[in-house]
Image (tube, grey):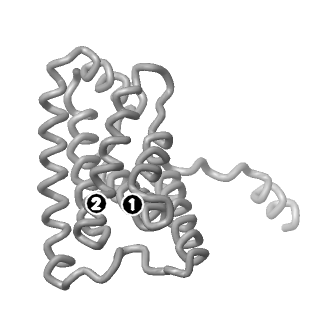
Amino acid sequence: MFRAMTSYSSRPPPPLSRASMVIGLYGAMALVAILIAAGRGDPDLYRLGSPPGWLLAVAPLLGIVVGLFVVWLTRLAARWAWARDLHRSFRDLLGPLAFRDIVILALASSIGEELLFRGALLPWIGVWLQALVFALLHVGPGKRFLPWTLSAALLGLAFGELARQTGSLGAPIAAHFTINLVNLRYIVRVPA
């Protein structure tokens, strides 16, 4: 009996699924955000100030509209070779993704990154610096990813302003989720 237990426990653990790794990464970002906010003495990461209730309610809708506008801009950019090259690079990097994986990636990244960058860092270091740090997180392997880094800087500014103007993370989370969901689905389904 001891021998059977020993052989069972000596097996290597199964590899983590892509979804588990994504949730772990963005969950760690959310935890860092909570620790930063607690260290600042402001544990409410979602609200920035005291926005009126009606603004809290419509902020996610505004975020979806902004997200769809950014998606439209990315489709316009597909006219240029650098955008098509970036599309192919992401398609190769991501490999096949099921719709479930796309939803998990879009949801986890939008919540984890917005809690960290707009919820924790924005009130502490300001719009410009949090956008710079956000862009640095989006540096890809090689020069072909430079447009992605630059767009992350611009989106970091836009999401920061959305958070400031609406007084909550509802709009930036909704915009970020919309952009990631629609663009990831497009990347894996449409060859460039």
Spatial separation of the CA atoms under disc 1 and disc 2: 7 Å
Residue lying at the far right of the rendered structure: 2
Question: Which quarter of the figure is the N terminus placed in?
Answer: bottom right
Q: How far from the left and from the top, in percent, is residue 18?
A: 47, 47
- Side of 166 where 43 appears, left or right: right
Q: How far from the left and from the top, in percent, is residue 95?
A: 38, 32
Q: How far from the left and from the top, in percent, is residue 105?
A: 37, 51
Measured along the vertical axis of the image, is residue 99 above or below residue 41?
A: above
Residue denoted by label 1:
114
Q: Residue at x 30, y 55 (%)?
A: 159
Of pointers 1 and 2, the one earlier in the residue sequence: 1
- The disc at residue 69 is none
Classify residue 81 by image quadrant.
top left
- The local secondary structure at tag 2 comes to helix
Residue placed most toward the observer, 131 or 9: 131
Hey, what amino acid is under mark 2? Pro
Residue lying at the far top of the rendered structure: 81
The answer to the question of whether label 1 and label 2 lie on touching residues, with beta carbons closer than 8 A, is: yes
Pointer 1 local density, CA inside 10 Å: few below 14, some 14–19, many at least 20: many
- Side of 68 where 155 appears, left or right: right
Q: Residue at x 56, y 75 (%)?
A: 40
Pointer 2 local density, CA inside 10 Å: few below 14, some 14–19, many at least 20: many
Hey, what amino acid is under mark 1? Glu
Question: Which quarter of the figure is the C terminus placed in?
Answer: top left
Q: How far from the left and from the top, in percent, is residue 4?
A: 81, 61
Q: Residue at x 14, y 32 (%)?
A: 75
Q: Residue at x 14, y 19 (%)?
A: 79
Residue denoted by label 2:
172
